[in-house]
Image: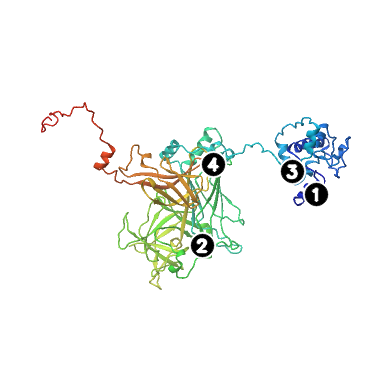
Amino acid sequence: MFQNSQAISGEDTSNILAGDMCALPSFEDLAMSWRIGQSMYSDHQHEAPPSYSPPAPYMPQLVNTQDGQVPPSDDVLQDLVIRGIPPHQPVPGMRMPPPDYLPPYLMDTLTQLQTFPMPEYMPPAPLSPATMQSVSSQNYNLHAPLSIPPLPAQPHNTPAQRTGPQNDRRLTKEAMRQYLRDRPDTTVVIMTAKVAQKSYGNEKRFFCPPPLLYLMGDGWKHRLQPVVMAGEAENEAQPYAFIGIGSAEQEMQQMNLEGKNWAVAKTLFISDTDKRKAFELKVKLFYGTGDDVGMFCSKKIKVISKPSKKKQSLKNAELCIPSGSRVALFNRLRSQTVSTRYLHVESGNFHASSQEWGAFTIHLLEEPQSESEHFKVRDGYIHYGSCVKLVCCVTGMALPRLVIRKVDKQMSQLTADDPVSQLHKCCFHLKDSDRMYLCVSQERIIQFQATECPKDSTKEILNDGAAWTIISTDQAEYSFYEGMGPVKGPVTPVPIVDSLQLNGGGDVAMLELNGENFTYNLKVWFGDVEAETMFRCAESMLCVVPDISAFRGGWRWFRQPTQVPLTLVRHDGVIFATGLTFTYTPELGPHPPTMEEAIMSNPIRPIPEDTPTTFPTNHYPDLEQL
């Protein structure tokens, strides 16, 4: 059965079965053969495996055990007669090579036999000579497949068992209500410029302004409380961050978060060997305990060669700056990198920071209008000579009305009217002032009075502090909360909902969510009510709008507008805030029933014969007694 086992391949299996085997071994044969071989092989398992030769015809005497053969017992001989195997053929199970030399097509079967307990081999009962003759004359199919009984079911690890029992806890209504009441979100904010200048050769043009990381919300403090209460070091709950450009050419750089909730990456750049036209920054977060928070991506950053010095046009609108978009402003004295200052708001004041930079919404103003807290804006792209308003995206503080002007050779160009482009140098003239410009003086923001150019009246001479570089910025924000306690494994990808689309109405209203990073294990919640959710793809999900009675007990029709927050919840209790709400609007209730509907709903019953047919006159004074 096992001869020439070292040379057996899948292609020769059928030939071996037909030529060298007289009968296919049964389940009991394999079990017995394996046990015989294991007991024999364990005595000299440290010896080199001998070379095997075809067995000699069977003879009932003790053979050489070093050759892997053992004398058959009477039970085995009787089994041979039952199976119809001639005595001069090799006996199945009498030759057992070491496991390493078994044929490939038997390795899996024998491994299973060794792994799981086999039933004890029961020798057959003695048979009469007539029965033996009848059995030995039966025909056997040599090519029949091995009949192996089903193996016992093995316990397998479910995803919840692999990640811990706490990851299998679904969010409860009580936990959602507490979240909606306290809003202890854990928020990651990545602020970047929309464009990055490519570096050539050995130069390194670091991204300016540098990427900023903010960790905001009370969720970070909630993660710290159990560690402090357990008496462990606070650094075990301290988050650590690494940032990179998503390329194998550069290693990720650690960001310094010690003692503060923000960090800056000042030494990132993209070389000319990187052929990408756009890229995303990757931020890796984890706790001091080693628990993985996840990988967070920035918004897309477009790669440019260098800022264009030619007069811009709206044909290249991708590099122009539209009204209502976010920009950053920085000043660099004598073109020195170490002297870079960024416009920023801190403690209610505008100042020039060397570390943090602020994002400001730039608005085109309607003309004419005076200085006021409330102002009218208009759409379009920012052009030189336009009156604009800069509003801090975080605090809402605004600078006075400004006229943006082009800077060339340290002079303000009063007649320039082309579109403002990325990384252009510009200056800001305070509207209705006598040549006063927004200026940097060390860390302060001051007003600087320019002087008229003696050679050209359309130009005004500035100092270094009044020349600003403008660039569009973007922000990626991710919010989550571990509603059922800390989870094992990352919380990413964080789903982002961009828009909602309501389909149908009444009892068949469906809400479509469009965004990114959707997964099949997400559910949509309306307030503290879980909705039936259908996953379509990573950019789209559908859900059934719950009935108003789920929020207002006893209501069958909308009596007043009801607004509920929309959230996404993962199967392990992680809550993702969408920042969106759903409003139930009032609609007409059921119409009054018609006479026919009233009669059908309250059929007339027959009056018993003994019922009096008179009515009290005091109830109907205008009627006489019948």
Q: Nearer the viewer, mark 2 or mark 4?
A: 4
Of helix, strand and loop, which one carries label 1?
helix
- Which amino acid type corresponds to the residue marked 4 in the rendered image? Gln
Residue drawn at x 14%, y 28% as measured from the top left:
616
- Which amino acid type corresponds to the residue marked 3 in the rendered image? Met
Q: Residues within 10 Å of mark 1 (few under 14, many from 20)?
A: few
CA gap, disc 2 to disc 3?
A: 73 Å
CA gap, disc 4 to disc 1?
A: 60 Å
Mark 2 or mark 4, earlier in chain: 4
Mark 4 or mark 1, earlier in chain: 1
Q: Residues within 10 Å of mark 2 (few under 14, many from 20)?
A: few
Of helix, strand and loop, which one carries label 2?
helix
Q: Which numbered circle lies on residue 335?
A: 2
Q: How many marks?
A: 4
Mark 3 or mark 4, earlier in chain: 3
Mark 1 or mark 3, earlier in chain: 1
Q: Nearer the viewer, mark 1 or mark 2?
A: 1
Q: Report x, y in % for residue 271.
A: 58, 61
Q: Which numbered circle lies on residue 238?
A: 4
Q: Quadrant of residue 419?
A: bottom left
The quadrant in which the C terminus is found is top left
Q: Are marks 4 and 1 in contact (CB under 8 Å)?
A: no
Q: Which numbered circle lies on residue 62?
A: none
Q: Quadrant of residue 588?
A: top left
CA gap, disc 2 to disc 4?
A: 38 Å
Q: Report x, y in % for residue 380.
A: 38, 63
Along the viewing direction, whichever of 485 and 500 lies nearer the viewer:
500
Q: Which numbered circle lies on residue 7?
A: 1
Mark 1 or mark 2, earlier in chain: 1
Mark 2 or mark 3, earlier in chain: 3
